[in-house]
Image (tube, rainbow, N blue to C red):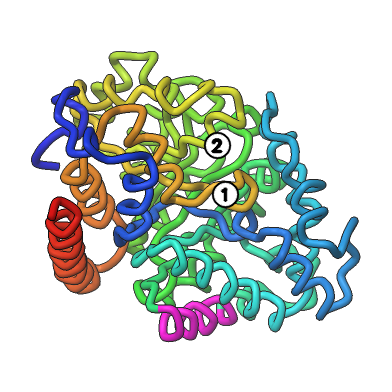
Amino acid sequence: MHETPLRDKQRRLFDTLSDAELMHRILSMPKVELHRHLVGSINGAIAVKIAARYGVELPSYIASELDEILFGCRKVNTLPEYFAPWATLERLFVSREAIHEIILEVIEQAAKDNVVYLELRMGPYGFLGKEPYTFEEFIHTVSTSVAEAESRFGVTTRCILGVPRHVFARISAYTRNRMFARMISVIYPFFPHTFVGVDLNGDESVAAGDHFKVFFRIAREKGFGITVHAGECGPAENVEYAVRELNASRIGHGIEAAKSPSVLACIAESGSMLEICPTSNEILNRVSQAGELPLRSLTECGVSFAICSDNPARNKVSLSEDLFKVATAFGLNEAHLHELTYSALNRSFADQGTKHALELALRRRFQALASTEACRDYHNMC
């Protein structure tokens, strides 16, 4: 990023805008989303639609009631509490046809929020043989579904394969590493057009990062991007391990790193980016409001970050709303928000050709929006 977005605390183009006008401009902006989970993007309406069609039992078939049952708890103290809705939501992945429809619905929701580039994270359904489809069938279904969604909704979508700590920590090292090698071999033919990265997620206290060194080594050798959930609820040292030992170029959350100057220095030196998810941090009681996020500390130490929605259905939030929270809390102007968008695109795992095409499209969209707003402001003054 050429200009740190928080350095000048007083610069605000939004000073003359009402909150409604600010939200209008953010909603209208093209956006880049680097950290969004597939399961956490399934809201009550999507769940009811899929469950009714494929005979999945739900605690309610009224979308508003289901939203309240699954996502009504706004504050939790542990990740298991946060992920409680997953026990219901994961039952929706009953067939390849259901997977296809879920992906279309989720990407359509992103399109409605003007997301133009999306990296969608998903767990390896079928890798243990518990579902009525194989891991290979799951990956193929994801690939064809993403291609169709991109054609229909105009969202350039790439996928990140998520490895859950709690699942693989229970498996012997020998079996685990054989599974890792197989998983990478299955997704590799879809690189870089569908699967572009790998992720380690889940409760950091369940398994140390060294359980997954083989996985990330294999992925890195094949050219996949590497992102790791670290410093979300675990200590800052987990972030440093992810950067130094797992070679993560991006860190999911990572806000605990702000408590350690040495870890911040490590991140800055490596050039890794933090994927900051404001509402998730609030729900997990890591911060009470967006203004408590350590964005100033990150900027002052030269650590880049992207603003992400994480689990928009679970969090009852959109990427636009998370950007609105940060913009109002830290006084970001339109130029800062555009800069954050370009920075996120630059640090995405997309290939260079895709990045270049999207950057040109972003510039055209931003210029068109600026012209439209200038005309509207002129007519309002007259």
Q: Does the magenta stretch include residue 206?
A: no
Camera-side residue of 282 and 139: 282
User: Residue 52 bears which disc, if any?
Assistant: none
The range drawn in magenta is 140-153
Which residue is disc 1 drawn over? 311
State the image coordinates of residue 269 (x, y, percent, origin top left).
Answer: 19, 30
Residue closer to the observer: 167 or 29: 29
Mark 1, secondary structure of its residue:
loop
Which mark is first along the chain, 1 or 2?
Answer: 2
Q: Is residue 341 left or right of residue 165?
A: left
Q: In this view, does 266 lie to the left or right of 290?
A: left
The residue at the point 42 percent across, 20 percent down is 292
Q: In this view, does 283 lie above or below 149?
A: above
Q: Which residue lies furthest to the front in this view?
A: 382
Observer-nearest of 190 and 13: 13
Q: Position of residue 144 (x, y in %)?
A: 52, 84
Question: Does 144 appear in magenta?
Answer: yes
Locate residue 377: give its quadrant. bottom left
Name the residue at 51% across, 72% down: 108
Task: Locate residue 7 relative to residue 214 in the image: left or right.
Answer: left
What is the quadrant of residue 76 in the picture?
Answer: top right
Compared to residue 324, the image places residue 254 above or below, namely above
Where does the image place residue 166, in percent across and percent down from the top left? 69, 41
Judged left or right of residue 357, residue 312 is right
Q: In this view, does 38 lie above or below 67?
A: below
Q: What element carries label 2?
A: helix
Label pair 2/1, CB-CB below 8 angstroms: yes
Residue beneath disc 2: 280
Q: In which quarter of the image is the N terminus?
A: top left
Q: Residue at x 33, y 51 (%)?
A: 26
Q: Which residue is drawn at 35% across and 53% down?
A: 24
